[in-house]
Image: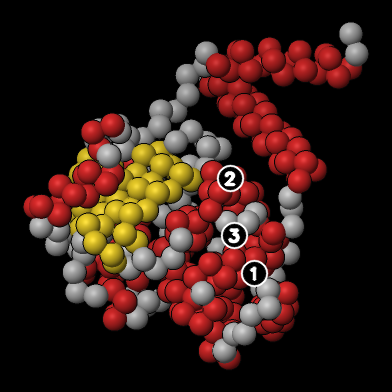
Amino acid sequence: MSSIGKRLSAIVLLLLVLAVLPTKAMGQAVITWGADLEPEDRVKVMELMDLANREKPARELEVTNGEEHALLGASVPASYLGTRAISSAYVRPLPVGQGLQVTTHNITWVSRRMFAQALITAGVRDAEIIAVAPMAVSGTAALTGVFKAFEAAADTELAEPGKRIAGEELYVTREVGKRVGEKQASRLVERVKEEVIRKNITDRTTIVELIRQVEMEMDLKLSPGDVEKLADLMTKLSGLGLTIEDLQIQLEKMSDQMDGLMGAETGLKSTVTSWLQRLLDLIARLIDQFLAFVAGARA
């Protein structure tokens, strides 16, 4: 048997062994309701979420407009946060590596892919997420609700800076989108964000140069205020410790909504490379789990 064949056999054997090992259970689904929903609106939200055909939530929480202001008030103008909380969120944790599966209804600020981008910034990973409102709204209550639901469902706590910057990311995208269009603004933010993370750029002057470069490549016309907002956002974002793998894995299921990251990694080569990287990541996780199990058994 060739060396490659032996390695593949070893990997298959390891996968079979790990398949029967006990693993940490995923969290259960959680719903956060906008606190100002009328009873009839809640019924409509339930229909839009298609709750009858989904995993029944283990917990139901509420999100208030006060919580929105407390969390996002430092990064999003009060006029955007409004005075009522009516958007709601359903969150169900998924196995590691499954990425984000985001659906939105009546969330008007940005596309669902950009919503997913903001969630990644906040530290949300591997979850089915449905953000819903009974009528067209900005969706800040849903964003706040997703954070609250994810923390409850995954039994974790998201860092406050990441959540605040996520809100700012949506706000800045929305503001830039007023001048260049929602889709173009989303692509612009995504491209700059990826390059900042990929190259670990922290210098604000370099970030401004990057924004101007992408602006020119996309044939856009940004205002000086747009550039300042984007540079401020990306400077803050650069300190969150995000990785390219965060974007690639978490956004994989969202690729039908927009061109791939940077619009450059397309075709068979990137597909094969991405598949191999995911396989290597999976094997690494399985080996870590196996070693941890062996260590626990010896203890």
- Sequence-wise, the earlier of marks 3 and 2 is 3
Residue 172 shows up from this direction: no
Q: Which residue is mark 1?
A: 192
The image quadrant of residue 208 is bottom right
Cα gap from disc 2 to disc 1, whole angstroms: 18 Å
Indicate whether 38 appears above or below 287.
below
- The three-letter code of the residue at mark 3 reads Gly
Residue at 83 percent across and 14 percent down: it is: 6
* Secondary structure at numbered mark 3: loop
Q: Which residue is mark 3?
A: 241
Is residue 21 toward the left or the right of residue 260 in the image? left
Cα gap from disc 3 to disc 1, whole angstroms: 16 Å
* Secondary structure at numbered mark 1: helix
Residue 70 pos. (x, y %):
28, 71
Residue at 22 percent across and 43 percent down: it is: 47
Q: Which residue is mark 2?
A: 252
The image quadrant of residue 262 is bottom right
Indicate whether 253 appears above or below 12.
below
- The three-letter code of the residue at mark 1 reads Val
Residue at 44 percent across and 69 percent down: it is: 170
- Sequence-wise, the earlier of marks 2 and 1 is 1
* Secondary structure at numbered mark 2: helix
Quick one: label 3, few (<14), some, or many (20+) residues within 10 Å?
Answer: few
Which residue, as the protein is rendered here, is positioned at the far bottom?
Answer: 224
Residue 173 pos. (x, y %):
49, 72
Viewer-nearest of labels 3 and 1? Answer: 1
181 and 21: which one is in front? 181
